Image (cartoon, rainbow, N blue to C red):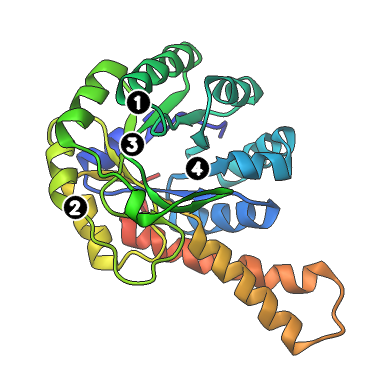
Amino acid sequence: MPLVSMNEFLPKAKANKFAVGQFNMNNLEFAQAIAQAAKELNSPFIFGVSEGALKYMGIEYTVAIAEAAAKQSGLPVALHLDHGSTFEVAMKCIRAGFSSVMFDGSHHSYEDNIRLTKEVVKAARAMGVSVEGELGTIGGVEDDISVDEADANLAKPEEAIRFYEETGVDCLAIAVGTAHGMYAGEPNIRFDIIEKVASAIPVPVVLHGGSGVPDEMIRKSILAGVGKINVNTENQVACTEAIREALAKDAKVYDPRKYLTPARQAMVEVVKSKIQLFGSANQA
């Protein structure tokens, strides 16, 4: 299948109370693992690509890998810019073949966030590309951007509802207490905010910082109206731990395939567990 907009599956996710996983693609092995897991469980999925990952892989390689994975898997697959910081970056990705983009205007004022997001939506919609917006500030570390937990700002439900009404985004990420990276303790998720926003808008709420969130909290978030959940750090940790284990077993190994193969399989298991938790298995 060709790459598709997130609108191919997110409305179904919201209507049927499951969530589709965004799994970040950081290299070929990540992409292969994500696609293999999704194919085994017949689940739609989203390749998330941060600006940092774009710089690392190159935009042409990124699109080619995603297109190959979509064709081979035969599943509905979206290639999604994660935390796009500018209109220009979003347009560059759309022109290169991305089927979905996120414009993260949360570092702007509320009014400027609305204005800039509307511009991205207008341009993307003309190309059949879906758009995710963001309101509030999510703590933790994403690429080179670090936000202290104390500085994270929770989204206000009334502002989130107005944000959707004025921008027309296809899904909306709101800060509700999760964070990028792994948690030192247990996150304090504001399910009341999710419920208020999700019940008032027709599109799914997005949960960023899905790595390390207890399963019961994930399930509760989905029931409250979350239809897209982002996972990256758990795959990174699984990949790195498998590589370290392989190198520790054989200090003389030099063939990357010898340690990247178990690393890839470790990520397959992470993604499969998330797909089953999110309820998207057999929803392709």
Q: What element carries label 1?
A: loop
Which of labels 3 and 4 is toward the front? Answer: 3
Residue at numbered disc 3: 10
Residue 54 position, x and y percent, is: 66, 39
Kind of residue sitting beneath label 4 = Leu
Residues marked 2 and 3 touching at CB (< 8 Å): no
Real-space Cα separation, disc 1 to disc 4, in angstroms: 38 Å
Residues marked 2 and 4 touching at CB (< 8 Å): no
Q: What element carries label 2?
A: loop
Which of labels 2 and 3 is toward the front? Answer: 2
Which of labels 2 and 4 is toward the front? Answer: 2
Kind of residue sitting beneath label 3 = Leu
**263 w.r.t. 230: above or below:** below
Real-space Cα separation, disc 2 to disc 3, in angstroms: 22 Å
Kind of residue sitting beneath label 2 = Arg
Count neighbours of disc 2 (C-alpha within 10 A) and say few if under 14, some if 14 to 19, many if 20 or more.
some
Q: Is mark 4 on a helix, strand or loop?
A: loop
Residue at numbered disc 2: 190
Kind of residue sitting beneath label 1 = Ser
Label placed on residue 109: 1
Side (left or right) of 118 relative to 128: left
Does label 1 or label 4 sit earlier along the sequence? 4
